[in-house]
Image: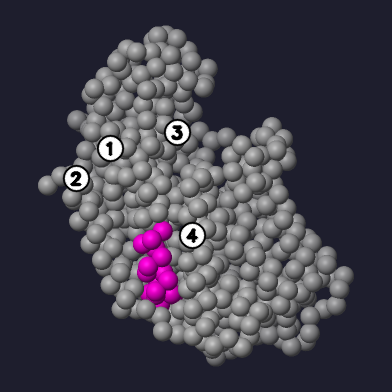
Amino acid sequence: MDQTTINFIFVGASFALYFAIAVWARAGSTSEFYAAGRGVNPVVNGMATAADWMSAASFISMAGLIAFVGYNNSSFLMGWTGGYVLMAMLLAPYLRKFGKYTVPEFVGDRYYSQTARIVAVICLIVISTTYVIGQMTGAGVAFSRFLEVDNTTGLIIASLVVAFYAVMGGMKGITYTQVAQYIVLIIAYTIPAIFISLQLTGNPIPGLGLFSSMAPGNAGGVEAGVPLLATLNELLDDLGFNEYTTGSSPLNMALFTLSLMIGTAGLPHVIIRFFTVPRVADARWSAGWALVFIALLYLTAPAVGAMARLNIITTMWPEGVESEAIAQEDLPDWFQTWEVTGLLGVEDLNGDGRIQYYNDASPEGQAFAEANGLEGNELVTFNRDILVLANPEIAQLPGWVIGLIAAGGLAAALSTAAGLLLAISSAISHDLIKSVINPGISEKGELLAARLSMIVAIILATLLALNPPGFAAQTVALAFGLAAASLFPTLMMGIFYKRMNSAGAIAGMLAGLISTLLYLFLFLGWFFIPGTATLDSSQYLFGIPPASFGPVGALLNFVVAYLVSNATDEPPQEIQDLVESVRIPRGAGGAVDH
């Protein structure tokens, strides 16, 4: 059986499962569409939250960025995991106790202001739209390879699939679909990693294999007995790349990690998952179970990245970098299959019939090229989002493993895309149409508005994903910065600072959102379109890159909100009493829990 047929079997079977669940669990009321009827078991919700959380950025893109950058991109692991702990401890239980459907609804009621609610909706749409671009980008990459079509066609197919089960099922359908998607993606991620760890180090646990010595007769063909990371560092150094375990600016790394952490705690599509459980105590248990499920992938990702980078180098230099690179006709089959997507490309620049891979932008790489008569890096295109999906092919694993990871990559991208689209549609239908524009709308009309707004959001995200501002994880990181700067401070002060009033919340959200957007637009381009930026990296404020600006925006939000709030009237007494009640963790039945 050829590989394409195997891919179709695995992907088709998983999609059939998702569609069946969507039909079985389709939402029949607004309560089911927004919060799954508040009847989801904590373990089930933990698994669904993990799938919602482990997006295309985690599954497809994160290991690829770690593979090519190394230690510096461990920020993704630390920031995302630490931020989830922050959200689980400081936000989720209290927001569940407040008993609303959406984040803007909490903001509107806590700050007794329709204006605050509208500003929160704007923040949510900006955050979620940026985030969903990354998910659709990852889904397009996966579809393009495994259906052997170009990237644009893959992206359109992905949007049609997610439209079907997200629009039909709402939160109820998405929840149970995400449980199935988690099972698919975690199996798909860990099985190839186990195979590759065994091939290279003989250790079946990838996280331990990362720190093990190379096994005799390893798949990379390098010297046995040498630690894997030391082997990788030596190869990278020979080719003019930075060592894998070397870091750069501590300030930028700390700011980027902090941006991911507090951005995580402000993500609306993850927060609303905690509105689906029956009790406040269940929200805490959901968070604990989600961390367990998330850890299974996050403890494996560093090993996947390092081992994949080693395999790429030994593919290009099969006899070691002191010898000739691989002949063009001997390039493995996986090169040809990925070249079809336009995400991988090689070019014989010096006409020697061989393909060399090295860093022609560094002095060390240029010296290496001069000593060997090379004229440039000939692996001219390698989209880092393909690495995890191509990893089983690079390691020459069985066809069924390749089909399995195809299904897993698509599950990761589509599960988070569905959650984001639900957050957007809920904000538009429930917080704008129902609460502001047409309070008398029927439940049936509100449900129709939610589904129509989700369709519009899917179309917009698909169009924007045709020209994303970076790799999937890089695009997602921008969304985290926006969440950190806009919603996180407002939610934190809404729970822990009774004196915070509507004027302060509105001013803070606008200050954080606008300052961060302006910084992104100045250095990345308007609407993140490359080539439209007005400033370059040499003009960064204190050397802070755009993806690390979130904490600065958050600080502006906190300061502006505090100053404005204390310069204006304090909130009504009933609001202060409500905040006090919500903050006391007595479980279900307190405050306005319903």
Query: Going 52% across and 40% down the picture, which residue do you hit?
Result: 72
Identify the element where label 4 is drawn. Answer: helix
| Dot 2 amino acid type | Gln
Q: Point out the tag, 4 or 2, that comes first from the N-terminus.
A: 2
Query: Mark 1–mark 2 contact, CB under 8 Å?
Result: yes
Q: Position of residue 373 (x, y in %)?
A: 40, 9
x then y, percent, for residue 346 = 36, 26
- Residue mark closest to the camera, 3 vs 4: 4
Q: Residue 337 has which mark?
A: 1
Q: Can residue 351 be seen in this view?
A: yes
Estimate the spatial distance between the alpha carbons at disc 3 and disc 4, rounded to whole Å.
39 Å
Mark 2 neighbour class, 10 Å CA radius: few under 14, some 14 to 19, many 20 or more:
some
Residue 529 is marked as: none
Q: Quadrant of residue 308?
A: top left
Q: Looking at the rendered structure, which numbered label has been put on residue 3?
A: 2
Give, as a three-letter code, the residue at label 1. Thr
Residue 136 pos. (x, y %): 44, 54
> Start and end of the magenta stretch?
159-174
Distance from the alpha carbon under mark 4 to that under mark 1 = 29 Å
Most foreground residue, 345 or 238: 345
Q: Mark 4 points at which residue?
A: 459
Q: Is residue 476 visible?
A: no
